Image (cartoon, grey):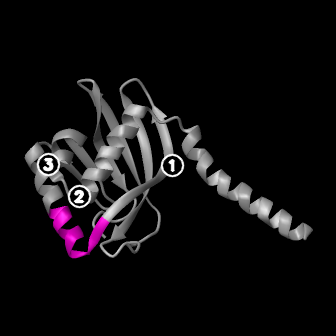
């Protein structure tokens, strides 16, 4: 009986420790709201909202073997259209944010890493159960936008 109580206590402590990092990070509420909108727009394939309200110009995408720099909204829009077409062909359904991995805020710049899960249309997990991407946010005209991203897994798979 004593072993069961100890095992349950350890299980409880370990499950609580998973939620602590997110709370310790004290992510700016404005940034949290921007990511809520971003994840909603990404899940629905709303390239217009992402282009107009979420990504800044220029926008840099740091891939494992190259860097893409988008210098216009039209370039971002075309990239997103192609990405969402590929996601659709891979049966992508939606994404959820699991938590924040890292967070560093300066006066007008933020470095943040989001942990998320992608799901297929049938609600099964798409690829790895937990993915991460690192982002650089810049505050321009009173609001944060994503100016750079490092996806740690393929974007459309």
Of mark 1 and mark 2, the one earlier in the sequence is 2
Where is the C terminus found, in terms of image quarters? Answer: bottom left
Which residue appears at 49% of the width and 47% of the height? Answer: 100
Residue displayed at 85% across by 64% down = 5
In the shown orientation, is residue 127 left or right of residue 42? right
| SS type, badge 1 | strand
Residue 33 within the segment the image draws in magenta: no
Cα separation between marks 1 and 2: 24 Å
Q: Position of residue 127 (x, y in %)?
A: 39, 72
Residue 44 circle label: 2
Badge nearest the viewer, 1 or 3: 3
Q: Dot 2: what SS?
A: helix
N-terminal-most mark, 1 or 3? 3
Q: Is residue 57 visible?
A: no
Mark 3, secondary structure of its residue: helix
**Label 3: few (<14), some or many (≥20) within 10 Å?**
some
Distance between the alpha carbons at the discs numbered 1 and 3:
28 Å
Mark identifier at residue 48: 3
Q: Which mark is residue 29?
A: none
Q: Which is more foreground, mark 2 or mark 3?
A: 2
Q: Which residue is mark 1?
A: 101
Counting from the top left corner in percent of width and height, residue 105 is at 45, 31
Left or right: 145 as drawn, with respect to 47:
right
Q: Decide whether the magenta segment is chiefly helix, strand or loop.
A: helix
Residues rendered magenta in the picture: 82-93
- CA separation, marks 2 and 3? 11 Å
Disc 2 vs disc 3: Cβ atoms closer than 8 Å?
Answer: no
């Amino acid at each position: 009986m004593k072993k069961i109580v100890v095992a349950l206590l350890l299980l409880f402590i370990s499950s609580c420790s998973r939620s602590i990092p997110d709370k310790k990070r004290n992510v700016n509420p404005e940034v949290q709201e921007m990511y809520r909108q971003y994840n909603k727009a990404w899940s629905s394939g709303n390239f217009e909202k992402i282009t107009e309200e979420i990504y800044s110009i220029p926008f840099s995408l740091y891939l494992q073997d190259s860097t893409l720099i988008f210098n216009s909204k039209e370039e971002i829009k075309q990239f997103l259209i192609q990405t969402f077409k590929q996601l659709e062909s891979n049966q992508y359904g939606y994404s959820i944010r699991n938590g924040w991995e890292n967070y560093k805020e300066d006066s007008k710049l933020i470095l943040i890493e989001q942990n998320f899960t992608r799901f297929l249309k049938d609600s099964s997990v798409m690829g790895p159960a937990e993915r991460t991407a690192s982002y650089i946010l810049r505050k321009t005209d009173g609001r944060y936008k994503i100016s750079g991203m490092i996806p740690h897994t393929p974007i459309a798979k």
